[in-house]
């Protein structure tokens, strides 16, 4: 379970204090698929960075399976990011001159997994996200946008994270490919008990998730519960 308690992140801009995240609280059960919608600049990416321990809050806390991130030293936060979090980005953030399978293997290499084991798991994950086996050895800069996003999702799953954070995962994709990606994320949450939080400005995508939140002026409110409840 992910518990977010009164999370605040503030910045100074001249004489002004800006709070893109201002007192945010919510809980996500294991295996849930949720989304956060909001306009550009509403603080969605800032909130995602806090949940993924890429940034530290001004106050408040994120608790993952009973462990408080606020109390963890930097070394433990690095371990948390490596072990418990998978990131999926709008721009894919793949290494273009490496193959799909090599990109997926990278997080496992950093985690110290043996080469044979990480190669086998990378191939299994690429099959799981339905990338054509003929393209597993193809450099990612020769794959389509939808194929690259599938590789990015497989990479996010590499170390069996508790939580996947997806920042505009369909933003650079056409509508049909975007539909396939959200269906893939839905099946991952349902079939593998992976908790997934999608940040998006696309309300039609958000309506396909089990829970939908809206971030506005740093405040988070839950809007709807859709038909994908678990």
Image: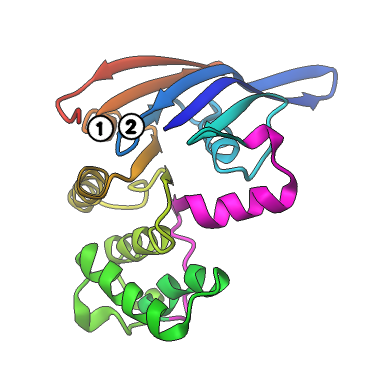
Whether residues under marks 1 and 2 lie with C-beta atoms below 8 angstroms apart, the answer is yes
Residue found at the very far left of the displayed protein: 227
Q: Is residue 26 left or right of residue 194?
A: right
Identity of the residue drawn at 68% across and 33% down? 70
Residue 95 showing in the rendered view:
no
Residue 149 position within the rendered picture, expressed as x and y whole percent measured from the top left: 34, 59
Whether residue 26 is situated above or below residue 166 in the rendered picture:
above
Residue 53: x percent and y percent?
61, 43
User: Is 208 inside the magenta-drawn segment?
Assistant: no
The correct choice, above or below, for 207 with respect to 170 in the image is: above
The numbered dot on residue 16 is none
Point out residue 99 in the picture as x, y percentages from the top left corner: 40, 81
Residue at the location (43% across, 59% down)? 92
| Rendered residue at 84%/23% (across/down) | 14
Q: Quadrant of the C terminus?
A: top left
Q: Secondary structure at mark 2?
A: strand
The residue sitting at 48% across, 70% down in the picture is 108
Within the image, what quadrant is residue 133 found in?
Answer: bottom left
- Left or right position of 89 against 147: right
Start-end of magenta stretch: 69-98
Q: Give the labeled residue for mark 2.
A: 34
Mark 2 closeness class: few <14, some 14–19, many ≥20 residues within 10 Å: many
**Image quadrant in which you'd find residue 8:** top right
Residue 88 visible within the image: yes
- Residue position marked by numbered label 1 in the rendering: 209
Among numbered discs 1 and 2, the one appearing first in the sequence = 2
């Amino acid at each position: 379970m992910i518990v977010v308690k009164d999370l605040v992140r503030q910045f100074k801009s001249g004489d002004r204090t800006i709070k893109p995240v201002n007192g945010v609280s919510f809980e996500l059960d294991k295996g849930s698929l949720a989304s956060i919608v909001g306009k550009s600049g509403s603080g969605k990416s800032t909130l995602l960075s806090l949940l993924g321990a890429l940034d530290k809050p001004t106050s408040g806390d994120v608790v993952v399976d009973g462990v408080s991130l606020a109390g963890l030293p930097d070394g433990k936060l690095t371990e948390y990011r490596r072990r418990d979090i998978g990131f999926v980005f709008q721009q894919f953030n793949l290494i273009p001159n490496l193959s799909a399978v090599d990109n997926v293997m990278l997080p496992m290499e950093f985690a110290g997994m043996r080469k044979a084991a990480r190669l086998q798991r990378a191939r299994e994950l690429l099959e799981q996200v339905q990338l054509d086996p003929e393209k597993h050895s193809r450099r990612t800069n020769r794959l389509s946008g939808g194929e690259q996003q599938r590789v990015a999702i497989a990479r996010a799953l590499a170390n069996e994270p508790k939580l996947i954070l997806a920042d505009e995962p369909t933003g650079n994709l056409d509508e049909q490919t975007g539909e396939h990606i959200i269906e893939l994320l839905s099946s991952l949450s349902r079939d593998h008990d992976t908790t997934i939080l999608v940040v998006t400005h696309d309300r039609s995508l958000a309506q396909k998730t089990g829970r939908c939140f809206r971030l506005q002026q740093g405040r988070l409110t839950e809007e709807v519960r859709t038909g994908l409840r678990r």
